[in-house]
Image (cartoon, grey):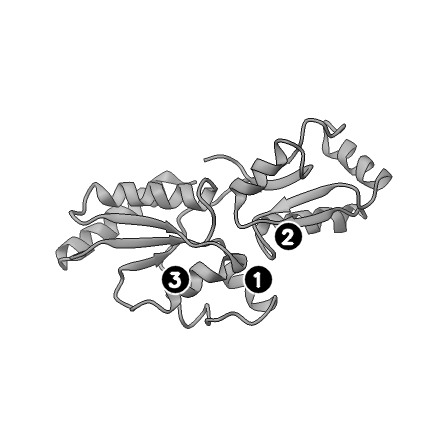
Amino acid sequence: MSRWLVSGCLILFTSLALAQGFPERPVKIIVPLTPGGSPDTIARALAQGLQGVWSQPVVVENRTGGSQNIGSDLVAKSAPDGYTWLLAPDNVFAVNPYLGKQPFDPLNDLAPVTQVARIQFLLVVNPAVPANSVQELVALLKAKPGELNFGSSGNGSPQHLGGAMLQLLTGTKMNHVPYKGAAPAIADLLPGRIQVWIGAAPL
């Protein structure tokens, strides 16, 4: 996460907003994923920073489901007054429109403001998986096609696409298990209910 970029955007935005008397009531940041993941962590950091300069509360609300479409739809259909924000991964705009009809138009019903973070991804496995490198994991997947499960934050999410790309590039097969966010997927990775996770590095 580029902290200086986020800080710079906050300073500029809040200075302009204060000059215009905004906000006059609480601001809500909608995160269309479960608590505990990177988008949720970023949203709460933004809320804390804004709370330091605004007299009004900044509330983070998690609205999960529908491959992030449920929370995004809530924002798309909210009043266009600047009091309801969306912090979403790029798949809401770049992937979901091609997976099925969304209940909103992401390019016309939402107004992009800024990029707040770039997140590095990790490939990890449960400790019981006998693989200590990517090469060993690929060899295991080839020896046991379709026997390992990998989790993601939902269909079309960057984690899902990362797992699909790994299989495509290596000629292997895993079972995809979509979740409503990173936190429940990691909760299943630790006891071994899923064996593989491609996801965001902790911020």
Depth order, front residue of 108/189: 189
Q: Which kind of residue does numbered mark 2 sit on?
A: Leu
| Quarter placement of the N terminus | top left
Q: In the image, 168: left or right of 81?
A: right
| Residue linked to disc 3 | 112
Q: Are marks 3 and 2 in contact (CB under 8 Å)?
A: no
Residue 82 percent location from the top left of the image: 27, 62
Q: Which residue is mark 1?
A: 95
For the point 57% across and 62% down, the residue is 95
Q: Is residue 154 above or below residue 144?
A: below
Question: Is 155 rendered above or below residue 34?
Answer: below
Which residue does the numbered mark 2 point to in the structure image? 161
Q: In x, y percent, where is residue 141?
A: 80, 40
x, y percentage for residue 52?
Answer: 21, 41
Give, as a three-letter code, the residue at label 1.
Val
Task: For label 1, count other residues whose C-alpha is less than 10 Å away and answer few (under 14), some (14-19) or many (20+).
Answer: some
Secondary structure of the residue carrying numbered label 1 = loop
Q: Earlier in the sequence, mark 3 or mark 2?
A: 3
Q: Secondary structure at mark 3?
A: loop
The answer to which quarter of the image holds residue 114 is bottom left
Give me the residue at 64% from left, 52% from top: 161
